[in-house]
Amino acid sequence: QVQLVESGGGLVQAGGSLRLSCVVSGRALSTLVMAWFRQAPGKEREFVSGISVSGDITDYADFVKGRFTISRDNAKNTVALQMNSLKPEDTAVYYCAADRNTRLIATTERPYNYWGQGTQVTVSS
């Protein structure tokens, strides 16, 4: 059984930083395309960032480009999202997701087979 467990969320002031981690168990991370999504209250879940199996290709939503960095350590079965220059509009529950079937970074939810439980990020103004 594949499990994704996120950590690292919390409360931070605008301009601050947080680092989210996602630990994958039950399947080798090297077989999975990984991504982060987020969902703010009253809004649909949206793509934030994704990373290819080998880590050589990354993708970012326009609203986080230049501020967030995704990375992966296949040996440690861990994916991270470094979030800098946080804004109040970044407040959301952040979810880690994994796609076992393709080599492409999908920006929609459907291709992702596995999801974490989410971690809350709150940015105060």
Image (cartoon, rainbow, N blue to C red):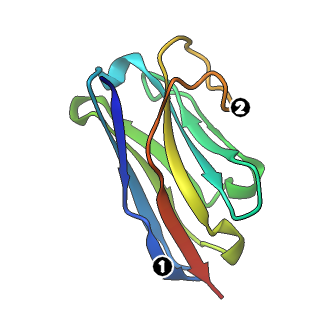
Question: Are the residues flagged by discs 1 and 2 in contact, CB closer than 8 Å?
Answer: no
Q: Amino acid at mark 1?
A: Leu
**In the image, 79: left or right of 64?**
left
Eyeballing the image, is 58 above or below 14? above
| Residue at position x 70%, y 32% in the image | 107
Label 1 crowding class (10 Å Cα cut-off): few <14, some 14-19, many 20+?
some
Residue at 41 percent across and 61 percent down: it is 19
* Residue at horizontal 71 percent and vertical 71 percent from the top: 89
List x then y, in percent, for residue 40.
68, 62
- Residue 29 location (% of width, % of height): 34, 25
Q: CA distance from mark 1 to mark 2?
A: 27 Å
Answer left or right for 26 relative to 125.
left
Q: Quadrant of residue 18?
A: bottom left
Q: Is residue 116 above or below residue 32?
A: below
Q: Earlier in the sequence, mark 1 or mark 2?
A: 1
Quadrant showing the N terminus: top left
Is 112 placed above or below 40 here? Answer: above
**In the image, residue 73 lies at what x, y percent?**
31, 36
- Residue 116 as seen in the image, left or right of residue 15: left
The amino acid type, in three-letter code, at marker 2 is: Thr
- Is residue 68 or residue 118 the one in the foreground? 118
Foreground: 96 or 56?
A: 96
Local secondary structure at mark 1: strand
The residue most toward the left is 75
| Residue linked to disc 2 | 108
- In the image, residue 47 lies at what x, y percent? 67, 43
Q: Quadrant of residue 72?
A: top left
Write down the residue under mark 1. 11
